[in-house]
Amino acid sequence: MCLAIPAMVVELCGKDEALVDLDGVRKRISLAMVDDVAVGDYVIVHVGFALQKLDVGEAEATLALLREIARAQQAAGEAGPAELP
């Protein structure tokens, strides 16, 4: 299953790239499809590309839901990543 997940921009790297943080995991992504992104903004990231900006409240609610799903899967003994962002 492919997911697009919220990540916070921590550094702008040139014209169309940024470094994002997702619970301590940092990744360089493309901003080619999104305009007016600044440090501190949340963006939806899929396969290394920011798809759109996201407001802080919506990003935090989505991340909280992903963490809850991960905890439920771990409690049920389902295989999966140790942690989700």
Image (cartoon, rainbow, N blue to C red):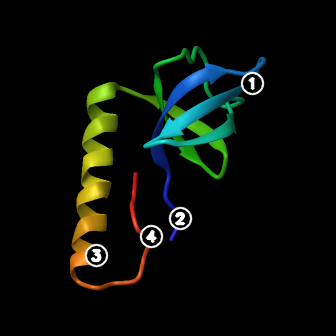
**Residue 24's x, y, as percent?**
48, 42
Instruction: From the image, tell me which residue sits under label 1.
Output: 16
Q: Is residue 67 above or below residue 43?
A: below
Element class at badge 2: loop
Mark 1 residue element:
loop
Mark 3 and mark 4 lie on one chain; the one further toward the N terminus is 3
Q: Mark 4 points at which residue?
A: 81
Q: Name the residue under label 3.
A: 73
Whether residue 20 is situated above or below residue 45 in the rendered picture: above
Q: Which of marks 2 and 4 is nearer the N terminus?
A: 2
What label sits on residue 2 in the rendered view? 2
The quadrant in which residue 79 appears is: bottom left
Question: Could you tell me if the residues under marks 3 and 4 are in contact, i.e. CB atoms within 8 Å?
Answer: no
Mark 4 or 1, nearer chain start: 1
Label 3, label 4: how far apart the Cα atoms are: 9 Å
Where is residue 35 shown, x and y percent of the image?
61, 19
State the residue at coordinates (22%, 71%): 72
Q: Residues within 10 Å of mark 4 (few under 14, many from 20)?
A: few
Disc on the earlier residue, 3 or 2: 2
Spatial CA span between label 1 and label 3:
36 Å
